[in-house]
Every structure is written in structure tokens, then in C-alpha cells.
Amino acid sequence: MTRSVLVSVTAALTLALPAAVHALSLDDALACGDRAHGYITSLQTRQLIADHPLHVEDNAINVFWPARHSELTAFGFRVYAVIGYEQDDPIFTLGRGEPMRGSLYGVVVSADSNAVAKVLNAVNSPAESKHAGPFLTAIYCRAE
């Protein structure tokens, strides 16, 4: 009986390892010192987000799902999606409308917009935030 418990615990730990390997805080990346190309390709190279967007907004903002088993956070909030677009950059898919100018990248987190704004203010972050849906808030950086 003890041996079967040990085998079960070992199997459970083995299954949990991929999630632990991919856990990552994106706080430093959201210090707004990058552009969308570098931000998105870095996450794709490390297999933390999908290679292709799940959705493209009319203004060309590309929305990527975090990879299965990745545990991305931003300022203590769980990342629901990663967003990005850089003008005239072929790695991004265009939407149906007029594409935005410049570069924008960030995340959508599962949190109330007031709670996110308080945290960003407390850590003196240059990132902006905006309500993105029920219990969803976008945290993003822009560059022209």
C-alpha cells in the first residue's frame, strides 16, 4: 500500500512539473521598455503563448492564449490573454478595420479594473489599464 501511494505521488508531481516550469511573472516586461514585436516573439519563442492569434480585433490588436500549462501573471493577477500589435510588422495579423498606429502590447488579466489601477499606481508602473469585460482588465504599453 505504501508503494502505491509513493507511485501516485510521484506521478502527480511529474504531471505538475510542466506547469511549474512555465510559471512566469510578466511584471518586468510590462515596464514599457519594449515594443510589441520583441514582447510577443519572446513569449512565443519560450512557448508561453500560441504561435498564432486566437482573435484579431478590427484595429489589428492580436489576442493570444497563454500556452496550456503556462501560469502567467502580471502584477499578481492571473493572465487571461496576451495582446499585441506593431504597425507594419508582418508577424501580426491585420483586422477588418483601420489598424492602430505604433506599437501596443500587454495582457488581459482576470481582475477588476479598480484593483488593477491601484496596483499599477502603487508600484509606479508606466503601463496603462482599461476595463476589457466583466472581471477582465487590459494592462498595456504603447509606443509611437
Image (cartoon, grey):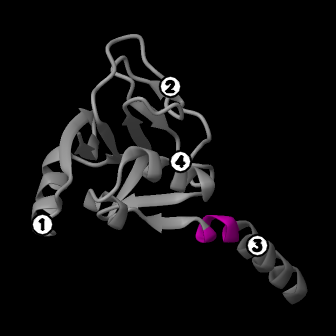
State the mark number for residue 14: 3
The outermost residue toward the bottom is: 2
Residue depicted at 39% across the width and 62% down the height: 26
What is the distance, in whole Å, between disc 1 and disc 3 at their CAs?
A: 39 Å
Nearer mark to the viewer, of 2 and 3: 2
What is the distance, in whole Å, between disc 4 and disc 3 at their CAs?
A: 21 Å
Q: Which residues are magenta?
A: 16-21
Query: Which SS class for mark 3?
Result: helix
Residue that mark 2 sits on: 93
x and y percent of residue 112 in the render?
21, 46
Query: Which SS class for mark 4?
Result: loop
Residue depicted at 74% across the width and 71% down the height: 12
x and y percent of residue 38 in the render?
45, 52
What is the distance, in whole Å, between disc 1 and disc 2 at their CAs?
A: 32 Å
Residue depicted at 60% across the width and 49% down the height: 67
> Does residue 47 appear in this view?
no
State the mark number for residue 124: 1
Nearer mark to the viewer, of 1 and 3: 1
x and y percent of residue 93 in the render?
50, 25
Dot 1, how many residues are within 10 Å of its Cα: few (below 14), some (14-19), or many (20+)? few
Residue kind at label 4, given as amino acid type: Pro
Dot 3, how many residues are within 10 Å of its Cα: few (below 14), some (14-19), or many (20+)? few
Residue that mark 4 sits on: 66
41 vs 2, left or right, is left
